[in-house]
Image: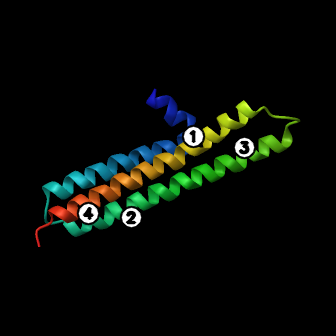
Amino acid sequence: MYLSILNDGGPFFMYPLLMLLILVIVLIVMGFIKKQTFTKNIKLISSISLFALVWGVLGQAIGLITGFDVISQSAGISPQVLAAGLRISALPSAFGMVIFLIGRLGIIILTLIQKE
């Protein structure tokens, strides 16, 4: 099921987002384990999660542009097809937002547990 969602959202955008999610999770775990690289991990998590958000929005924008091109060239389109296309174009953006929120939550938790 999840593999089909990754393919529906466009492999060019969704698979890099999946790799960024894994990287954010690894950096959060490393922040708990290695206290020496704490500041570096927080900066990396912040940058990578923001990049994931922007990458997802870019995927949505390109998907919408492509979809509107197809709609403009066709004689007519049903509301069901339009809704399916909008759903597909929203997947990378939503996935990027989830990664961003996970990264921000990790930063908050790491900041709270940091010893002053």
Label 4: few (<14), some or many (≥20) within 10 Å?
many
Of callouts 4 and 2, the N-terminal one = 4
Q: Can you identify the residue that label 3 sits on?
A: 67
Name which quarter of the figure residue 41 lies in.
bottom left
Looking at the image, which residue sits at the far front? 79
Q: Name the residue nearer the viewer: 105 or 35.
A: 105
> What amino acid is labelled 3 in the image?
Gly
Q: CA distance from mark 3 to mark 2?
A: 30 Å
Q: Which mark is on residue 41? A: 4
Label 1: few (<14), some or many (≥20) within 10 Å?
some
Q: CA distance from mark 4 to mark 3?
A: 38 Å
User: In which quadrant is the C terminus drawn?
Assistant: bottom left
> What amino acid is labelled 4 in the image?
Asn
Q: CA distance from mark 1 to mark 3?
A: 13 Å
Residue 8 in the image: state x and y as whole percent. 57, 34
Q: Seen in the image, is 78 located left or right of residue 56?
A: right
Which scheme is used to colour this image of the protein?
Answer: rainbow
Looking at the image, which residue sits at the far right? 75
Q: Decide: is 104 above or below 69.
A: below
Q: Can you identify the residue that label 1 sits on?
A: 10
Of callouts 1 and 2, the N-terminal one = 1
Looking at the image, which residue sits at the far top? 1
Q: Can you identify the residue that label 2 sits on?
A: 47
Q: CA distance from mark 1 to mark 2?
A: 23 Å
Q: Which residue corresponds to the image point at 33% horizontal and 50% vertical from the top-left?
A: 23
